[in-house]
Structure formats: C-alpha cells, structure tokens
Image: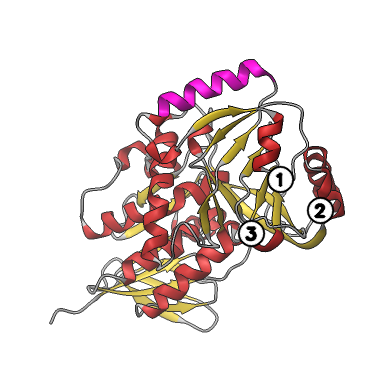
Amino acid sequence: MSEKTKIAVLGGGIVGATTAFYLSQLPQYDVTLFDSGTGQATSAAAGIICPWLSQRRNKQWYQLAAKGAAFYPQLIQDLGEDPTQSDIYRQVGTLVFKKTPKLLSKLEKIALKRREDAPTMGEIAILSPAEIKEKMPLLDVKEEALFASGGAKVDGALLTTKLKEQALKNGAAVYHEAVTLSIQANEKQPYHLKGIATERTFDKVVLAVGAWLPELLEPLGYQVDIRPQKGQLVELHLDAATDDWPVVMPDGEKDIIPFANGKVIVGATHENDQGYDLEPTKKQLQVMLDEAIEMAPELADADIKGIRVGTRAYTSDFAPFFGEVPESSGLYAASGLGSSGLTSGPMIAKILVQLINGDPTDLPVGDYPIEIYITQ
C-alpha cells in the first residue's frame, strides 16, 4: 500500500473549506486544514448566486461565475443536503432593480441570451410593483424589477461550517491557528508550516487565505497583487415567514437577502483603504440600513441580531486567479475573488482538486493566470 500524499489547505473560507472537503473524499490524500478564522470573508458573507444578471464585461469572470452557480446544487447534494430545502442554499429567485425601464429592458435581453447556455437561470420576467409585492411582501416599490427564478441565496457561515464538518468526518484534520510557510526544496516533504502549537511538513499546500496571501508569500520572495476590502452586513429579524422570499438586488450594492425563520441580511458595504480593520462602523452600517429601509419600510422595526465584518481580496484589475504558484511545484493558490467569492469559490476549489489530481479541468486555468498576480 503506497503512502498517502500529505496536503495542507490554508484558509477555511469558501475556497479552502471546499477544497479540503473534496480532497478528503479521495483515499490517496491525508488532508489537514488550517483555519485561523480571522477576518474571513466567507464566514461574514451571505450571498446571492445570480451571476447571469451581472453586466460585468469580463468574459472569463462570467464563465467562472456561471459555472459556479451551476455547480451549487451538486455541492449541496454532496454535503448530504436537499438543495430545495436546505437552510444553507436555496433557489428562491432574484429580483433586480435598475434606474430606468430602458436599462431594465436591456438587462432582460442580456439574461434571455445567456439563458441559452445557462438553464439554471430559470424563468425570466419583468414584474410590476404588484407582482413584486406578491413575491416579496417586504418590498414597497413603485418601479418594475427583473425576476430570475433560478437565483439563489447562500449563507457563507453555514456553508463553510458544514464543509469542515464533513471533511472531519472524512478523516481530515483541522487546526484553528495561523501558520507561516517555508520551503525546503531538497526535502521529501518540502513545505514546512509552523504555528503557535503546530509544526509539520507536507508534500503539497493549497493557499486559500484570501486577502492574507501576501503575508505568506512575500517572505518567500514573491510579490502578490492583492489588496483588502472591508465588507459589513447587518443581520435582522422579522416576525414573518421569510423562508421562500426571493433575494433583492437594488440598483447599487446593498442587497436584501431573506433566510429561514425571519432572518434577513442587509449588505454589504465595499470599503477600500481600510486595511484589515474588522471593527463595525456605525456610520457605514446606518447608511446601508437607511437605503434598505427606503425599499422595505418594515425593516425599520426589525430587531438587529448581529453584525458581520469580513475582508475581501481584490487584484488591481478585479480579476480572480488560481493555479500552481510559479517556480513552486505542489504549491497552489487562489485569491482575488472579491464580492463574487461565494459564487465562484466552490468551482475554483473543484478546479484546484482537479489540478492536484492531474485531471482535466472544468475551465482553462490559463484564463485565470496566477503568474500575472504572483511574481518573483
């Protein structure tokens, strides 16, 4: 019996937890996940899985996000959940608002065209204010909205918790601490990880630490094109049956995402030049809430149950990257996912597992070139 390949995954967010989960299902790997939890974007995030209605022009980004959206039902099933009933992820539809009817009509045409290759999108329709109210009683609006029935909501904290639980059941080890990375090129297991309580060596390492990637790679002589962005969300509670309400994307960045049992998430902020600050900012949160209350007046009386703060990772051109780190065989990294991390993260993790296995990848890795963002 051959010895197992020892793989460490650094970072317990959406990419790291999904990678560890799928690697732990394969008998040839001994998987260890290091998850310090600090500032993790996924654990703070509640996301809308609806990339088809984005007007972002980067074709590679869209292909990745669309693949990620289509992959979600399979991921949830692999975790032993029913995609139609899960509190982690559910397709409830998405309502998208635009500034003018002309812009809304333009978006409808884009969506109908994209649906030819993305049946997950479901039915597409422009709804009147009365029809919107019927689907989403919380809203009080005078304008129309575009509705995509395949749009979904996902709770990042619940998802990563479930992924790590299943990885543990599959035999993976999980350490809740930060580690440093060093490389001993001539050793059998060249990658050394050292934390406060742990020091171990590995055959391969996956770096899925988001905005903290420079901290690990720059001491090894790499330059890393990653910068942090602060994101804040507010968790509210309503006395209402919110389970099947659709998610709402206003014209702007402050989404309204209803979950089960009266939970409603509002967010998120996009704050640059805040470094790695994780303190809630009352002014920013209030501006965000006020915008949501304009569309949904009942939120003014909702109870605030919590505030989530995380740090997203962005590249200078806002494009994600992933793959094998240049000049370091067996060292993999992914970052730069920004605010679409919950959508694209699981697909990136799947591709990383395919790369590690030497299997064909679901998307061309060359379309997301790591060597542009990690250089020596």
N-terminal label among 1 and 3: 3
Which of the numbered marks, if any, corresponds to residue 14?
none
Circle nearer the N terminus (2, 3): 3
Residue stretch rendered in magenta on the structure: 100-114
Q: Comparing marks 2 and 3, which lies closer to the viewer? A: 3
In the image, is residue 110 part of the stretch drawn in magenta? yes
Q: Nearer the viewer, residue 344 or 372?
A: 344
Label 2 to label 1: alpha-carbon separation: 10 Å
State the image coordinates of residue 347 (x, y, percent, origin top left).
39, 50
Q: Secondary structure at mark 1?
A: loop
Residue 333 coordinates in the image, percent (x, y): 41, 54
Q: Decide: few, some or many residues near mark 2? Use Cα within 10 Å; few <14, some 14-19, many ≥20.
A: few
Query: Dot 1 corresponds to which residue?
Result: 269
Q: Which quadrant holds the N terminus? A: bottom left
- Is residue 26 visible in this depiction of the protein? yes
* Mark 1 and mark 3: Cα distance apart in space: 12 Å
Rendering quarter of residue 101? top right
Three-letter code, disc 2: Thr
Q: Specify whether residue 193 is in view.
A: no
x, y percent for residue 189: 29, 73
- Residue type beneath disc 1: Thr
Q: CA distance from mark 2 to mark 3?
A: 15 Å
Q: Nearer the viewer, residue 274 or 50?
A: 50
Q: Does the CB distance between marks 2 and 1 fall below 8 Å?
A: yes
Q: Is residue 313 magenta?
A: no
The residue identified by callout 2 is 281
In the image: residue 103, left or right of residue 359: right
Q: Earlier in the sequence, mark 2 or mark 1?
A: 1
